[in-house]
Image (cartoon, rainbow, N blue to C red):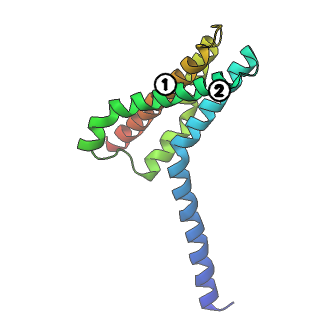
Amino acid sequence: MKAGKLDDSWTAKRTVRAALGTTVAGSAAPYGYTVTLWSSGAILIRSHGLPPVAEVFAFAAGALCGFGLMGLLARGALTSMESLGDAAERVSAGALNWFAVGTAVGVVALISEIHGWEVWPLSSFIATALYVLLASLQLAVVAARRNS
């Protein structure tokens, strides 16, 4: 094999690995949130059956309101602070998603015992808010450990 082909192969492998790292780091929080919200909906469907269209919209509205509230809480930090965590810290925090996902889904399992249409927006609101708060805590812990 010629040296040029060996260099090209090494460069291609490094590029693919760098791309994988970039994708994993960028997906850590959204992946955990997707698992949280899907699992929460599945728990509600198991407890309450398939929702009518209005309750689907209520579930979506609850999640949007939960994220909106988290955005309002983070507003000052977004304008006055640097983002916390480099790519490696975001991946490490994402590896801890079992905590944020498990807690949020566990609380939704408890909430699913409520009967009535309000369980749909309440569950997605709580799942969203808890996941975002706990995932943020996970990142803060990872960043603090690295800085100490």
First in sequence: mark 1 vs mark 2: 2
Amino acid type for the residue under numbered disc 1: Leu
From the viewer's side, name the closer residue of 6 and 32. 32
Q: Say if 101 sits above or below 115 in the image.
A: below
Q: Quadrant of residue 10?
A: bottom right
Badge 1 marks a residue whose secondary structure is helix
Assess whether mark 2 and mark 1 are in contact (beta carbons under 8 angstroms).
no
Marks 1/2: CA–CA distance:
20 Å
Report the residue marked by disc 2: 56
* Amino acid at the residue labelled 2: Val
Horizontal side, residue 89 vs residue 104: left or right: left
Quadrant location, the C terminus = top left
Residue 89: percent from the left, percent from the top? 44, 46
Rate crowding at label 2 as few (under 14), some (14 to 19) or many (20 or more) other CA atoms within 10 Å: some
Report the number of discs: 2
Above or below residue 42? Residue 146 is below
Determine the residue positioned at 50% across, 51% down: 26
The answer to whether 136 is drawn above or below residue 21 in the figure is: above
Determine whether, in the image, residue 88 is placed left or right of residue 145. Answer: right
**Outermost front residue:** 54
Query: Residue 61 at what x, y percent from top left?
Result: 53, 27
Circle 1 residue: 130
Q: Image quadrant for the N terminus?
A: bottom right
Q: Secondary structure at mark 2?
A: helix
Q: Is residue 58 left or right of residue 68?
A: right
Residue 126: percent from the left, percent from the top?
51, 21
Q: Nearer the viewer, residue 119 or 40?
A: 119
**48 to 82, vertically: above or below:** above
